[in-house]
Amino acid sequence: MEDWQQATKFLIEKGYFCEAITAQGKGQSQTRGLVFAYPDRLQTLTNRGLLTIFDSTHKFNVHGYNLFTFMCRNEAAIWVPGANCLVETENSNILAVALRKIYQWSGCQWKMEYPLTDNSAIEKAAVRKAFQSDSEGHVKQHLLCTVHSERTLRRRFRSQETHIAYEHMSQIVTKQGRFHMTNNY
C-alpha cells in the first residue's frame, strides 16, 4: 500500500494525471491498478490514437506487477506512449477501468477505432467492456500485430489440407498489412 502512495505522489509531483483504480478480479477478489498519463502524451493519444497499440510488460517491478503501455504515432510517425497502467494481475475488468479513465482524462475525445494487440483474450475483452456502451462507436476493428496474426494463422491452418489456404492468408497479412499500416500513418 505504501508503494502505491509513493508512486502516486511521485507521478503527481512530476505533472502526471494519476489515479489508483480497482476492479473485480477472479472470484470475489479486488484487483488494484495505477493508471497514469503525462498531459502532453495524453494529448497525442487524443489527437492521433485512432490506431492504438497496447500490450503489457510482465513482472515489471519487484512485486511482479504488469505494466500496460498505450501507444500511438505522433506527428513525426514515431510510436510514443500516451498512457500507462500498472496492475497487480492481468484481467479484463481492471484494464477496462483503466481504458475508461484514460478516455475521461482525454475529455472523452480519444477515439480508439483500431486497437492493435497481441492475441490476448484479456485485452480484447477489456476494449469491449470499456467501450461497448459508448454511443460514439469507438472500436471499428480489433487488429492483431503481424507476428500474432501469423501464429494464429499457423495454428488454425496447420493441416495438410489447409496448407494452401495458410500460404495465401499469410501473404495477405504480411504484404497488405505492412502496406496498409505505412500508408495510413
Image (cartoon, rainbow, N blue to C red):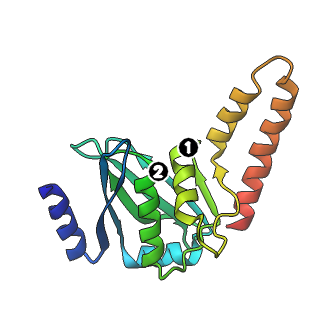
Q: Which residue is mark 1?
A: 121
Is residue 136 visible in the rendered structure shown here? Answer: yes
Q: For the residue marked with disc 2, what is the amino acid?
A: Ser
Q: Residue drawn at (54%, 71%), measured in percent from left and top?
A: 74
Would you call the spot at circle 1 few (<14 residues within 10 Å), some (14-19), or many (20 or more)?
Answer: few
User: In this view of the protein, which residue sits in the foreground, 175 or 114?
Assistant: 114
Direction from residue 22 to residue 74 in the image, left or right = right
Evaluate if marks 1 and 2 touch, with contact meaning CB atoms under 8 Å apart.
Answer: yes
Residue 105 screen position, x and y as percent: 42, 77
Is residue 78 visible in the rendered structure shown here? Answer: no
Q: CA distance from mark 1 to mark 2?
A: 8 Å
Q: Quadrant of residue 93?
A: bottom left
In the image, residue 182 above or below residue 106: above
User: In this view of the protein, which residue sits in the foreground, 1 or 80?
Assistant: 1
User: In this view of the protein, which residue sits in the foreground, 59 or 123?
Assistant: 123
* SS class, disc 1: helix
Q: Which residue is mark 2?
A: 92
Q: Residue drawn at (66%, 55%), measured in percent from left and top?
A: 142
User: In this view of the protein, which residue sits in the foreground, 170 or 24?
Assistant: 24
In the image, residue 82 above or below residue 93: below
Direction from residue 167 to residue 33 in the image, left or right = left
